[in-house]
Every structure is written in C-alpha cells, then in structure tokens.
Image (cartoon, coloured by chain):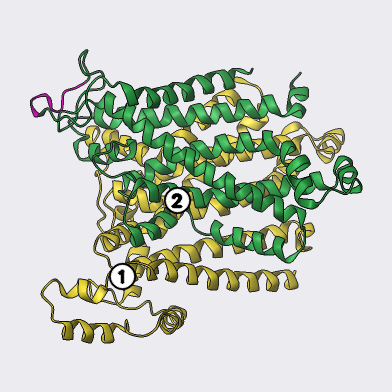
C-alpha cells in the first residue's frame, strides 16, 4: 500500500465514520437552539464554536458529513449504473447506430455542467437534496460511459475476447463476463475521483441554495450562512470548509493511491 | 480540413437544436401559470387570460417552442415575466460582468499554471516538483467559493486592500472594474490552475521521454533547448484540450462566485429569476451557457485538428 493510499483512506474513512456515528451520537442536538450560547468561539465545551442560533458547529459538521457523503455516493451510483452499461453497449456495437446514438447523447449531456442541470431541475421541481443527487448523477453518466467505451474497445481486439467469440458467446455475455471484470480497477479509480467531485459539487449546490434544505445541516449551506458573519465569527466559515477540503483531499489521494496499486504497469515502472 | 470543419459544424447545429429542446421541455414541466403568478392572487380570470394571450402562452407547446427558437436565432429572447423588459438586454448587461470574470480567471490560471507545470516537469523528482504536486493536490480539493470567502476575510476585512463585494460598473473605468473582479478571479482560478499545472507537468514529462527529444539531445542541444524547441510544443496539445474544457467550468463556476462577491452577473440573474419564477430568464441564461460550452468545444476540436492531422480522420 502506498503512502498516498494510506493517508487518503484514513482521511476519507474518518469522515465516513463521522457520518455513521452521527446517526447514534453527536455532542449536541443539531436541532436544539440555545440563543444564550450563540456565536461562541471554539472552546473546550464547543470544539468548533457555535453559530448564530447557538447550535454546536462540530455536531452540525458530523451530520453534514452524512448529507455530503450520501449525495455524492448515490450520484456516483447513478453515473456508474447507467454509464457503464451504455459504454459497454456502445463498445460491443462499435460503429453502429446504437454506438453513434449513445456517444452523441453523451456529448449532449456533457454540454450541461452539473450546475446548469441543477438550475433546470430546481426551476422545475424546487430545491432539495434529491434534486442535487439527480443533477450530479446525470452529469456522471457520460463520464463513465466514455471511459467504459474507450477501455472496452481496446479489450474487444484482444485474444481472449476473440477466443470467447469463437466459443460462440454473444456480445452481451462477453461484455458481462470478459470485458467488465477487466475494467473494474479503472472504474474503482474513476469512481473515487467522481465521488470527490460529487462532494465538491454538492457543497457548491447547497451553498447557492439548490441542495439540502433547512433544517438539515449541510456543509455548503453552513458556509452560505457563515458568509455574512465572517468578519466577527470566522470559525463558522473555517471548519465546514476544512471538512470539505479534508474529505476531497482524502478521496483524491485514495484515487491516486488506488491507481498506483491497481495498475501493474505503473507498479513495474516504479520498482 | 474543410470537410472535417463542415462535419463538426453540422454536429454543432444538431447539438444546439437538441439542447434547446431539452431546456424548453424542462421548463415546460414546471407547474403553475406564469401569467397568474405575475398578476398575483386577486387577478380576475379575464385578466389572466388576456396576459396569457399577450405572452403567447395559450399556443401549443410545439408552436411556442418554434417561436422561442426562431426568436433566439434573431437574438430575441422574449420578455421577462417580472421585469417586463427584453431578456436579451438583461442578459447582455450581465454578460459584461460574467464573461470578463471568466476570461480574467482563465488568463490568471494559464499564466500561473503553465510556467509552474514546466518548472515542475523540468525538475522532476526534486523538492520543487514535490512541492508543486502537493500544492496542486490541495488546490484541487479547495471549493472555490470557500477560498473566495477566505480571500474576503484576509484581503477585504483585515487588510482592506479590496472591497468585500459589489461591482462599480465599467463606466467607472477599466481599473475600478478589474479591481472589483480581482478577488473573484483569483478564487475562480485556483482550482483551474491546479488542474492545468498537473496536466502541463505530466504532458511535458511524457514528451521529454520521447525519441525525438532524445535525438535532439544527441544532436547537442542542452536539456533546456530540447525542452523549449521540441518537447514543449507537443506537450501543449493536451493542455489545449483541458483549457477548452475549463472555460465552460469557469462560466459555471462564475455563477457561484458571483454570489460570494455580490457581482451583478449571469449567476445572480439566474438565481433571482428562479426565486421569482421568471422562467423565461432561466431558460435563456441556461441556453446561452450551453451554447457557450458547445461553441468552445467546437473551437477546441478545430484547433486540435489543425495541430494534429491524424484527428481529421473519423474517430
């Protein structure tokens, strides 16, 4: 295991644990308002301070981790669940109408950055965490479809696939039994990267009010609320931001580390 | 080359047509009647019906789409439901903030990232390289709107070198305008510069290992000469692609950053329009941004094909 992978996994794991722990325990109740204790700087009782309602910032970050991780995880699931089969189908029918249709469809979705999809969905259906998931998930589909198609195309010309075709296996079966397993490490690495991009996107969407709605704490909205108080309560802006940076950094390091660990060519080059 | 350009132009037109249908359909499913919303709770049914007719809302969806699309081709984006002014004019005003901001950020990130990437690649494995890689790893992980808030805290609240937000307008002079856009542009440029520096570095390292660079070195060129005359030019090809991709992200990112600095750009316009259910404005801004993304992709494809003849062949 490389150093990147260890540090990254530790950081990302810590936030996954924080998100899970928040279901059973937080230092304070995030819904409880305590006006007498409002805007306290970080101290032994409130590690990350309190906000303008007297809510404990540390507890809010723990619960916010839940939203961030859940949105990003489901969005990656949507991207992979739809993008990978589309990419496999395009590669298996290379040059056909189906391939062309899938790739042009991909180009089209690519022209809509996640933020624009979110704006359209929100204009139509109103803001919610679910709409943020859909927006980021839709944006992930062409990423996985493109990657899968490209990698699958090079596998289709390999001898073991030829052998499977000679053995009489159909295109769908070859895709599932021979192509997909050989793409798994590539998909894991890309999945980690999209996961970290998803966390950033969710933070951005909830910052502009297109994500999780009050009273659910989310890192992006905590930052939006902190903005007007930054001159006299900078800790409100500091800690949610650090939480985002640490999670995204952890996932990126993990992605790099996984790539090194899973790609034998790089491993040989390093040795 | 011409045949390639024509083929790409056709697919550009097709993408635009399909994208406009998608945007129109998304807005079409919005519940509620804009005419009733504009006139408020106490409007008489007759007044609502009259306004619907005036806005052209009583026609069928196909007819309204044709109307909207034909209008956009003429530069007529319709009339805002809330402001009762032509959307094209509103968008044009806001574009004078968003576009300079995106270009400013793109210029900043290119000017910083390319030399840094070249520097790191030429000192591969040294402390400089490790430092650059670490810094860019961090730069990619920082949300730009949070970085923007930190910039405000340091340079506006504490040092008072810049104002914390707002835009004086270009009528106050180019200097004042650029000054107001400086912190937003830096915030926007940071993650882009990090990505660009990494791409520049890895592309250059790859070309430095190629045979023609070895040949150039064997002919007696120094490392620096071989890098400047041979490797750098080829390494710029992937950098060009990323630059094109980044522009669309910069425009989208500008929408969020504008909110941090209270800049009267497209971003503020679109969020105000969402809140006021001024859907024709939302529709126009989204369509305009999608158009920009498709157009930049097209330009990059052409530039790419001009540099690399292999790409002119299909696939």
Q: CA distance from mark 2 to mark 1?
A: 30 Å
Q: Are marks 2 and 1 in contact (CB under 8 Å)?
A: no
Q: Residue at x 75, y 56 (%)?
A: B308
Q: Dot 2 falls on which chain?
A: A
**The chain coloured green in the image:** A
Hue of chain B? yellow
x and y percent of residue B281 in the render? Answer: 33, 68
Q: Residue at x 59, y 36 (%)?
A: B198
Q: Which residue is mark 2?
A: A134
x and y percent of residue B69 in the render? Answer: 45, 79
Q: Is residue B105 left or right of residue B57?
A: right
Q: Which residue is mark 1?
A: B90
Residue A227: which disc?
A: none
Instruction: Examine the rendered structure and indicate whether residue A55 appears above or below residue B20.
Output: above
Magenta-highlighted residues: A35-41
x and y percent of residue B218 in the render? Answer: 87, 33
Residue furthest left in the image: A36
Q: Residues within 10 Å of mark 2 (few under 14, many from 20)?
A: many
Q: Secondary structure at mark 1?
A: helix
Of residues B213 and A103, which is closer to you in this image?
A: A103
The answer to whether residue B104 is visible is no
């Amino acid at each position: 295991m490389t150093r990147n992978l260890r540090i990254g996994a530790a950081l990302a794991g810590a936030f996954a644990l924080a998100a899970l722990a928040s279901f059973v325990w937080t230092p304070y109740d995030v819904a409880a308002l305590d006006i007498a204790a409002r805007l306290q700087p970080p101290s032994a009782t409130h590690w990350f301070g309190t906000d303008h309602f007297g809510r404990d910032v540390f507890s809010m970050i723990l619960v916010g981790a839940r939203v961030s991780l859940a949105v990003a995880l489901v969005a990656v699931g949507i991207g992979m669940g739809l993008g990978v089969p589309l990419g496999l189908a395009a590669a298996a029918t290379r040059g056909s109408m189906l391939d062309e249709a899938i790739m042009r469809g991909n180009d089209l979705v690519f022209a809509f950055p996640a933020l624009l999809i979110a704006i359209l969905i929100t204009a139509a259906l109103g803001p919610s965490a679910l709409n943020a998931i859909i927006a980021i998930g839709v944006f992930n589909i062409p990423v996985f479809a493109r990657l899968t198609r490209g990698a699958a195309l090079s596998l289709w010309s390999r001898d073991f696939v030829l052998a499977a075709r000679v053995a009489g296996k159909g295109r769908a079966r070859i895709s599932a039994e021979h192509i997909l397993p050989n793409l798994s490490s590539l998909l894991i690495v890309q999945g980690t990267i999209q996961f970290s991009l998803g966390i950033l996107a969710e933070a951005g969407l909830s910052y502009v009010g297109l994500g999780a709605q009050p009273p659910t704490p989310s890192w992006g909205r905590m930052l939006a609320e902190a903005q007007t108080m930054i001159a006299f309560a900078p800790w409100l802006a500091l800690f949610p931001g650090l939480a985002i940076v640490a999670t995204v950094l952890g996932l990126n390091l993990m992605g790099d580390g996984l790539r090194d660990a899973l790609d034998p060519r790089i491993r040989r080059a390093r040795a | 080359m011409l045949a390639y350009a024509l083929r790409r132009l056709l697919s550009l037109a097709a993408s635009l047509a399909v994208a406009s249908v998608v945007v129109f359909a998304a807005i079409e499913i919005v519940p509620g009647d804009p005419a009733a919303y504009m006139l408020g709770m106490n409007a008489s049914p007759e007044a609502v019906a009259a306004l619907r007719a005036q806005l052209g809302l009583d026609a069928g969806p196909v007819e309204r789409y044709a109307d909207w699309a034909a209008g956009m081709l003429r530069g007529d984006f319709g009339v805002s439901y809330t402001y009762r002014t032509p959307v094209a004019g509103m968008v044009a005003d806001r574009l004078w903030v968003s576009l300079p901001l995106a270009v400013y950020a793109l210029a900043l990130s290119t000017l910083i990232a390319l030399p840094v990437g070249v520097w790191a690649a030429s000192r591969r494995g040294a402390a400089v390289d490790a430092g650059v890689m670490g810094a860019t790893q961090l730069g990619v992980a920082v949300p730009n709107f949070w970085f923007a808030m930190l910039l405000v805290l340091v340079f506006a609240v504490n040092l008072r070198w810049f104002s914390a937000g707002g835009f004086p307008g270009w009528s106050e002079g180019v200097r004042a305008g650029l000054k107001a856009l400086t912190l937003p542009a830096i915030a926007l440029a940071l993650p882009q510069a990090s990505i660009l520096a990494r791409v520049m570095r890895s592309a250059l390292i790859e070309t430095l290992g190629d045979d023609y660079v070895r040949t150039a070195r064997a002919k007696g060129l120094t490392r620096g000469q071989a890098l400047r005359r041979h490797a750098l030019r080829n390494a710029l090809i992937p950098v060009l692609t990323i630059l094109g991709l980044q522009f669309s992200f910069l425009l989208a990112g500008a929408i969020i950053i504008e909110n941090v600095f209270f800049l009267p750009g497209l971003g503020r316009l679109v969020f105000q329009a969402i809140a006021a259910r001024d859907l024709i404005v939302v529709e126009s801004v989204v369509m305009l941004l999608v158009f920009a993304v498709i157009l930049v992709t097209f330009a990059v494809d052409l530039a790419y094909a001009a540099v690399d003849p292999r790409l002119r062949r299909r696939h």
